[in-house]
Image (tube, grey):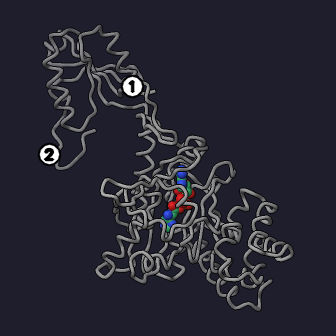
Amino acid sequence: MSSGGIRGLTGFRDFFPEELALRRHIFSAWRRVGARYGFTEYDGPPLEALELYTRKSGEEIVGQLYEFEDKGGRAVALRPEMTPTFARMIAARAAGLPKPVRWFSIPQLFRYERPQRGRLREHFQLNMDIVGETNPLADAEIISAGIDALRELGLGAADIVVRISDRRLIGALLDAHGISAEDHVPVFGALDRLEKEGEDGVRGRLAEYGVEKEVATRLLAAIRQPLEELAAAHAGDEAVAAAADRLSTVFAHLDATGFADFVRFDAGLVRGLAYYTGTVFEIWDRRDELRAICGGGRYDDLLKALGGVDLPALGFGMGDVVLTELLRDRGLAPDAARRVDDYIVCVSDAERPLALGLARALRDRGRRVLYDLRPRGVGRQFKAAHQAGAGRAIVLGPQEVERGVAVLRDMASGEEREVAIETLAGPRPDETRGEEVR
Ligand code: HAM
């Protein structure tokens, strides 16, 4: 509870220092991977015109919008996802950007969802997107980047799995089973619920769109097949063959990259968002205990719809909420115990001026330094040094100071030795030709 009895809003997080340490750990891993893949970082506004989302994101997200009218009477919404902003920004500069564009961002997003494990009303999301490339190498590249964003945090093929499909393949399958094009999007939506609602639930939904029972049975059987079998079963169908071929190429590239253990074909995966046009994928924890960590795909028509420039694009969003749970669960959260390097202990108040000067000199050199803010006994000061996780204590006592020395105690081993005070801080970094003093 916060001051005055006012609670934080449901589904919104306070980041206490330990939580912020984990968030920063995740973000810096994401940024390292972004840089390694040659992506540059961008950001946009957290508030956008409502229309940016109602045009293309699809029912599910639109139903979860934090939308309101601003004081100027404009219909606005807090961003529930980054892709429309990204598309708008790319469209604004499209002509001048060398292709393919590789950009990443780590926005905070807002969705009015029912808060539950892994789903809140705000979350951060790594977005990595490529614009201007239709070749399947781009699809493999973006999926590899997603895998690496998790490998960088210590997760391996035993922890996570990427489920991959292609809407063109599912679309061609629907055509092959006589489901008309205008029903594809709702049928995609029904199939997307297979994991959540089971076959019976999906059958019920398909019946609502007029899909006959027997067709539904064949369709559900088809999407359970491995890619080769599915392609073989529809050998005469050109559209299915072309889509299957393309997807096989993506898998071959991922195999060559060394990520075969991380990926699997799942024809039942279609993704909830309306704008995907090709490859779609999601990353899940292997034990299937949590919600999806990451979701993405190809959206070759969105830039045209939102910005009027006809450029193919693809990318993913990786959320921090499920990932945080997974890292904690696997013991991969960083140890935040060590807060400071040096704790300066004063035996009497007479050493205070020396301690202050020494602290400043050490901090100038980048060391993390603490000392008591009021006079206390030496024992209490050592206790505080322990609590702060100090690496070493620098003890300044009247007799030692007389001789120009301090006692240096290694806080882990308890070992002590005397050192000349004037050498304690060492040379300043600018006097060491860039060498770091740590
Ligand atoms: P999305 O599947 O809606 O895709 O979200 C991607 C990931 O964000 C999810 O897998 C999940 O980890 C996280 N996420 C989404 N909603 C919540 C929530 N309420 N609470 C916690 N985490 C959440 C997109 O947003 C697409 N715009 C991604 C994309 C980028 N596609 C292409 N480029």
At 78% from the left edge and 60% from the top edge, which residue is drawn?
201
Q: Nearer the viewer, residue 355 or 270?
A: 270
In this orientation, which residue lies closer to the viewer: 16 or 67? 67
Which residue bears the numbered disc 2?
Answer: 430
Vertical order, 397 against 408 (above or below): above
Dot placed on the residue nearer the N-terminal end, 1 or 2: 1
Q: Indicate the position of residue 156 as horizontal and vertical percent values.
A: 59, 55
Q: For the residue marked with disc 2, what is the amino acid? A: Asp
Report the Cα–Cα distance between label 1 and label 2.
Answer: 46 Å
Left or right: residue 181 compared with residue 68: right
The image quarter containing residue 173 is bottom right
Under 8 Å from ligand 1: the CB of mark 2? no
Q: Quadrant of the C terminus?
A: top left
Say whether residue 81 is left or right of residue 290. left
Task: Give amino acid for label 1.
Answer: Ser
Q: How far across and how far down the image is residue 210, in percent?
A: 77, 75
Q: What element carries label 2?
A: helix
Q: Can residue 154 be seen in this view?
A: no
* Number of numbered discs on residues: 2
Give coordinates of residue 138: x percent, y percent: 50, 76
Residue drawn where x is 39% and y is 57% of the image: 31
Q: Name the residue under label 1.
A: 3
